[in-house]
Image (cartoon, rainbow, N blue to C red):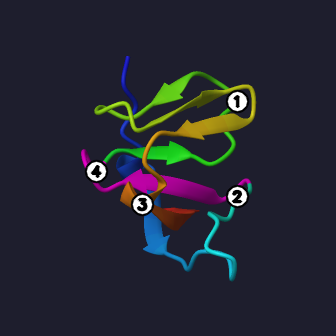
Amino acid sequence: MKLDLRKIYRFDPIARNADGSLPSGGDIYYECTGCKDVVSSVPHIVARCECGNLSGKGGKVEITAPDKVNPVRGKLK
């Protein structure tokens, strides 16, 4: 079952860290620019974007192509 987080949250773009790395945290999500799916930066359940660039579970996310990821902050609608 695929959950569309855009139905629950409003996402606003945020900047990468000063060193170019991606920020992470409870309200930080990653948007894949390839398939436009959104995955939590600290997924506690199995999460994966459609194209496979983002995948994770247990609080860790793996990113195949970091240059194809935009960090966003999620707020409940």
Q: Which residues are magenta?
A: 26-36
Residue appearing at x 67%, y 65% in the figure: 23
Residue appearing at x 66%, y 59% in the figure: 27
Q: In the displayed structure, would residue 12 be above or below residue 69?
A: below
* Nearer mark to the viewer, of 1 and 3: 3
Q: Earlier in the sequence, mark 2 or mark 1?
A: 2
How many neighbours does mark 4 have within 10 angstroms: few (below 14), some (14-19), or many (20 or more)? some
List the residue tagged with mark 3: 67
Dot 4 amino acid type: Lys
Q: How far apart are labels 1 and 3 at the CA level?
A: 24 Å
Say left or right for 75 vs 10: right
Is residue 51 covered in magenta? no
How many neighbours does mark 3 have within 10 angstroms: few (below 14), some (14-19), or many (20 or more)? few
Say left or right for 59 vs 45: right
* Nearer mark to the viewer, of 3 and 4: 3
Q: How far apart are labels 2 and 1 at the CA level?
A: 13 Å
Give the quadrant of the N terminus: top left
Q: How far apart are labels 2 and 4 at the CA level?
A: 18 Å
List the residue tagged with mark 4: 36
Question: Marks 2 and 4: CB-CB under 8 Å?
Answer: no
Q: How far apart are labels 3 and 4 at the CA level?
A: 14 Å
In the image, which disc is placed on residue 44? 1
Q: Earlier in the sequence, mark 2 or mark 3?
A: 2
